[in-house]
Image: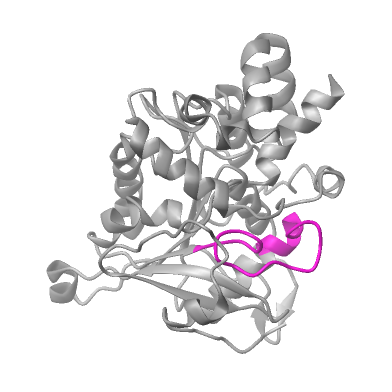
Amino acid sequence: MAVSVSWFHAHFLNVSKSNISWKPVAVLSSRGKKMGVSYDLKQGQSRVFHELPSGLSMEVIVQKGVTEKELEKKKEQTPLVFVHGSYHAAWCWAEHWFPFFSASGYDCYALSLLGQGESDAPADSVAGTLQTHARDVADFIYQNIRSPPVLFGHSFGGLIIQYYISNLGSDKHIGTEPLYPKLRGAVLVCSVPPSGNSGLVWRYLFSKPIAAFKVTRSLAAKAFQSSLSLCKETFFSATMEDHVVKRYQELMKESSRMPLFDLRKLNASLPVPSVPNCPIEILVLGANDDFIVDAEGLKETAKFYGVSPVCVEAVAHDMMLDISWEKGAKVILSWLNGLEK
């Protein structure tokens, strides 16, 4: 049983001031592509690279939001910064949600964590720790985002953001600036709860043994990469067409070149430190048909921040890619509109 727990964990894990380096899209070819399957950017999107203090670069997909209404009001909308989960990269946000939110005037930035997508990989067997990934996100915001953004996190990316939130207001600084820049808010999408995924694992093993086996086989054994039906069941709704699932399956297969974390170090760092007086607004968003994060996990995250969870009906774990992707996007847009008032 312990082996099954470790295997199930693997899904989620394959989930100082420096000079900024914005490089044009053309530079990508000279760097050498890291993904064997390319993600073709949509109109209005660009791919740039942010250089971290370590000298490694993170892929960033950008889509600026400009609407006639915004120009008339001359009002700058809150920037949106997106962090993916295991087996994904920046592209997963660019597919549907970037065109949607940019059309409402929001500037959107999606990061590929180290060792994922087209980002550089560190000289190690894993991409980093909960702390280093959060710091990389913080460094990007510090160097590039002028006003406090709303930070999005999906699945294990949500746990990274939770760690970021726990450090808001800390006494650590870069010169006179806080190590973790201020946020306007955060959106946790089908997020791993603050205690990690151990609770999810044990609940599945005892209450849904068949589902536990499927998830273990799909994610830890990476069977989702070769089985179209298992990929669909794990990430998407049953009604999604096979050719669409196949495209995402190929992108996911190429997106994670190394695990995001070392299991033992991650477990030693959990649970995420509590935030008694959370300084920002948080939306905890779940999917009713989520095959990975169950209802109890969603409730745990919401309770941790003292908010009510919002569960979207008829949507699967990959809410931003699923066939009904607009359902979650509309909930978030409504929440953002309330935040802007």
**185 to 202, vertically: above or below:** below
The rendered magenta stretch, by its main secondary structure, is classed as loop
Percent x, y of residue 332: 36, 46
Q: Quadrant of residue 238?
A: top left
Q: Quadrant of residue 67?
A: bottom left
Percent x, y of residue 125: 81, 57
> The N terminus appears in which quarter of the rendering?
top right
Report the side of 226 relative to 330 (left or right): right
Report the side of 66 relative to 30 (left or right): left
- Is residue 133 highlighted in magenta? yes
258 vs 298, nearest the viewer: 258
Residue beneath the point at 23% across and 59% down:
104
92 vs 178, nearest the viewer: 92
**Residue, far bottom:** 19
Q: Specify the color scheme.
A: one colour
109 vs 11, nearest the viewer: 11
Magenta segment: 111-134
Percent x, y of residue 119: 59, 67
